[in-house]
Image (cartoon, rainbow, N blue to C red):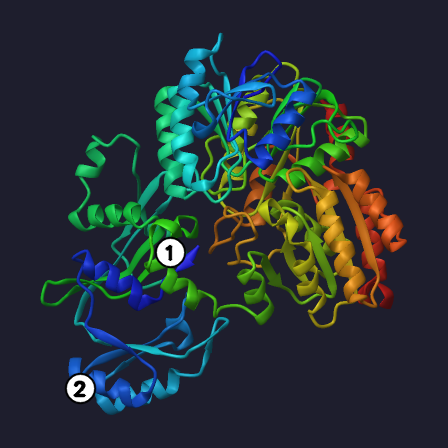
């Protein structure tokens, strides 16, 4: 999933004939003041971050003229909202609001069909107004009268949703102005990264920015096609497959330990055990490592060969615990015995218990 | 969607490295592989079976046509391959491919639904009928993991589904079928659909449902389970996963208030499902619940 920045999302809507406020992205208070001269004097100064709930955290300020715009930009720039440091602000012409509404297109998780959500109430998080939202699931029959009955703006959004390979297009608030105009005052677009290959150069430009999110190690992992999420615990985890990796973290916590990361090398990433292990072992305060493989497509022999090679090269001074089953398990278990002189555990239950025992938290008990 | 040895299976992408490796594994297990598809190698033989230019060509050339098509094709070619399998009148298409654009999946499911074809996946590790046949990339051939029996297993995750079967087999519970529904947010066969198939299957006496955070597959399955008399045990992965982060599977993300562990667990428990905290508790929970019924 790729989240577009607000200004990018809005420029896409504008190109499709949906009005947005005039404005610019700037990085200094002086520039913010200039935008207020150009489009103001009354402007909205908005932190350029992708995380939600920005308004509640002081990330949006209405300024009544150039000096106030500069002041607002000064106040917002450099602060941290969510896990992002605000490096730029979007300064836009303030609109005279008559009413605020909500409109989005997403995929209904139950039917797997596109779904339009609309509400007469807008400007607050969708989660806080769930009971006021009307949903329309778009059926598969193109001659469906349903689509014909959509408002023109809704039909436009639905068309954009499909054409852009989007996962979400949300306009919130959709403002009706006192002059009778309809303007997308804030917009979110999330694109499907699996479809990036047919939406260049749009995706190329976003991915570069997206790379700036997350910790150093998370970005390094992403650069080599691995999904790493750093956590607060001390037990490093290396498992294959999203489901097994989440289950491994759950099991560690259930037995009183604390996982240091989510990192899986399943699917096509099963040949990347070496860089994966280097990444997790470079995290600070690691007290032990749990290797939990259950190979289906991902072959345990291939993954384990990588772990053994990386372990020998890095020689980390921490205990490591193995549990290996599934495709290629016999070769893999034998490799751990002969190459590392370690006896793998026969079950995941034993392995998780052993690693929690060996971890910092476990040894304090 | 429960396969047996009489089903004629076509392998889309048979000549690739993974296609070749897993075709050999499936053949050794007894899966009735009748052919493969690769337009560039049509007319040749691979893994002792004929290679066709398309599934449609295979269906018209082979006695008995094509029952099941399995896709070892890259994401960019998946939609066309599914449409081809649907045109070949396959009753089941097993889509192993990960990273198919979700709008392609939506189109593929539309096409399949209109033709009466069932899609399993995308992003599934496949399906297994222990002792009979398997389609996909599952270690079905390892008797320490899969054993014939009466427990149906549904899983979004291949690795965790494999682990569940291993724990079951170790405790003496054989499986009637393993149905991998896949890790994508939009699936041709949902957990609810898979449960309905196991509900209708006479061999299946109990069901293990392996779910995970994100989406509504477990909540929707709970509604179908509530109407069934078969005992169900579930493990749900992702209890301690941080919200707002995509946990590997595109479908495994908790966004706002939807897709949470608590929502899934309470929906399943309200339907009489025993939800365990760690995977290795599945067999004991199953033994206890089967004794009661």
Percent position (x, y) of residue A109? 43, 42
Q: Is residue A109 above or below residue B135?
A: below
- Quadrant location of the C terminus of chain B? top right
Percent position (x, y) of residue A301? 74, 44
Determine which residue is flagged by label 2: A37
| Secondary element type, mark 1 | strand
- Quadrant location of the N terminus of chain B? top right
Q: Same chain for marks 1 and 2?
A: yes
Determine which residue is flagged by label 1: A190
Disc 1: host chain:
A
**Left or right: where A349 falls relative to B242:** right
Q: Earlier in the sequence, mark 1 or mark 2?
A: 2
Give the residue at x 39% y 48%.
A195
Query: Is residue A86 among what the camera can see?
Result: yes
| Secondary element type, mark 2 | helix
Tell me the distance, in whole angstroms, between the alpha carbons under discs 1 and 2: 32 Å
């Amino acid at each position: 999933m790729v989240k577009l920045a607000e200004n990018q999302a809005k420029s896409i809507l504008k190109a499709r004939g949906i009005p947005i406020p005039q404005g610019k992205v700037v990085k200094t208070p002086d520039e913010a003041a200039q935008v207020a001269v150009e489009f103001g004097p009354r402007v909205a100064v908005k932190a350029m971050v992708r995380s939600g709930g920005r308004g509640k955290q002081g990330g949006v300020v209405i300024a009544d003229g150039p000096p106030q715009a500069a002041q607002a930009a000064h106040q917002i720039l450099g602060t941290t909202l969510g896990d992002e440091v605000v490096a730029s602000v979007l300064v836009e012409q303030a609109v005279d609001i008559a009413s605020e509404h909500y409109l989005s297109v997403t995929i209904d998780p139950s039917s797997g069909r596109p779904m339009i959500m609309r509400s007469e109430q807008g400007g607050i998080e969708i989660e806080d107004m769930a009971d006021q939202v009307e949903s329309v699931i778009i059926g598969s029959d193109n001659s469906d009268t349903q689509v014909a009955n959509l408002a023109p703006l809704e039909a436009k959004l639905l068309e954009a949703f499909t054409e852009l390979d989007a996962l979400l297009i949300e306009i919130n608030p959709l403002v009706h102005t006192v002059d009778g105009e309809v303007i997308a005052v804030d917009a979110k677009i999330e694109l499907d990264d699996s479809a990036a290959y047919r939406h260049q150069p749009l995706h190329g430009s976003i991915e570069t920015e997206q790379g700036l999110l997350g910790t150093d190690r998370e970005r390094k992992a992403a650069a080599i096609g691995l999904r790493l999420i750093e956590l607060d615990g001390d037990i490093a985890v290396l498992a294959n497959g999203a489901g097994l990796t989440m289950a491994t973290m759950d099991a560690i916590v259930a037995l009183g330990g604390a996982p240091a990361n989510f990192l899986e090398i399943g699917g096509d990433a099963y040949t990347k055990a070496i860089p994966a292990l280097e990444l997790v072992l470079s995290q600070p305060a690691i007290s032990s490592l749990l290797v939990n493989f259950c190979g289906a497509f991902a072959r345990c022999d291939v993954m384990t060969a990588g772990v053994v090679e990386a372990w020998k090269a890095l020689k980390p001074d921490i205990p490591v615990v193995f549990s290996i089953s599934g495709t290629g398990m016999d070769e893999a278990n034998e490799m751990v015995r002969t190459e590392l002189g370690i006896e793998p555990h026969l079950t995941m239950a034993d392995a998780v218990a052993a690693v929690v025992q060996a971890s910092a938290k476990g040894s304090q008990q | 969607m429960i396969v047996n040895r009489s089903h004629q299976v076509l392998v889309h992408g048979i000549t690739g490295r993974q296609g070749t490796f897993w075709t050999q594994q499936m053949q050794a297990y007894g899966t009735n592989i009748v052919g493969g598809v690769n337009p560039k190698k049509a007319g040749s033989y691979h893994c002792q079976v004929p290679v066709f230019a398309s599934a449609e060509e295979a269906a018209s050339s082979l006695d008995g046509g094509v029952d099941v098509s399995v896709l070892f094709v890259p994401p960019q070619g998946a939609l066309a391959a599914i449409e081809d399998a649907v045109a070949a009148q396959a009753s089941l298409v097993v889509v192993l491919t990960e990273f198919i654009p979700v709008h392609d999946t939506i189109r593929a499911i539309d096409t399949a639904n209109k033709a009466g074809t069932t899609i399993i996946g995308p992003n599934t590790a496949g399906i297994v009928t222990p002792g009979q046949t398997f389609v996909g990339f599952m270690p079905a051939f390892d008797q320490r993991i899969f054993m014939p029996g009466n427990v149906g297993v549904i899983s979004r995750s291949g690795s965790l589904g494999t682990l569940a079967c291993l724990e079951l087999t170790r405790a003496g519970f054989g499986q009637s079928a393993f149905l991998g529904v896949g890790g994508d947010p939009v699936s041709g066969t949902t957990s609810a659909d898979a449960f309905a198939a196991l509900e209708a299957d006479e061999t299946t006496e109990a069901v293990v449902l392996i779910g995970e955070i994100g989406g509504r597959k477990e909540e929707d399955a709970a509604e179908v389970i509530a109407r069934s008399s078969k005992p169900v045990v579930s493990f749900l992965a992702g209890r301690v996963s941080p919200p707002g982060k995509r946990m590997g599977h595109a479908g495994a993300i908790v966004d706002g208030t939807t897709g949470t562990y608590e929502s899934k667990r309470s929906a399943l428990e309200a339907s009489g499902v025993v939800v365990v905290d760690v995977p290795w508790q599945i067999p004991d929970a199953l033994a206890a619940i089967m004794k009661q019924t």
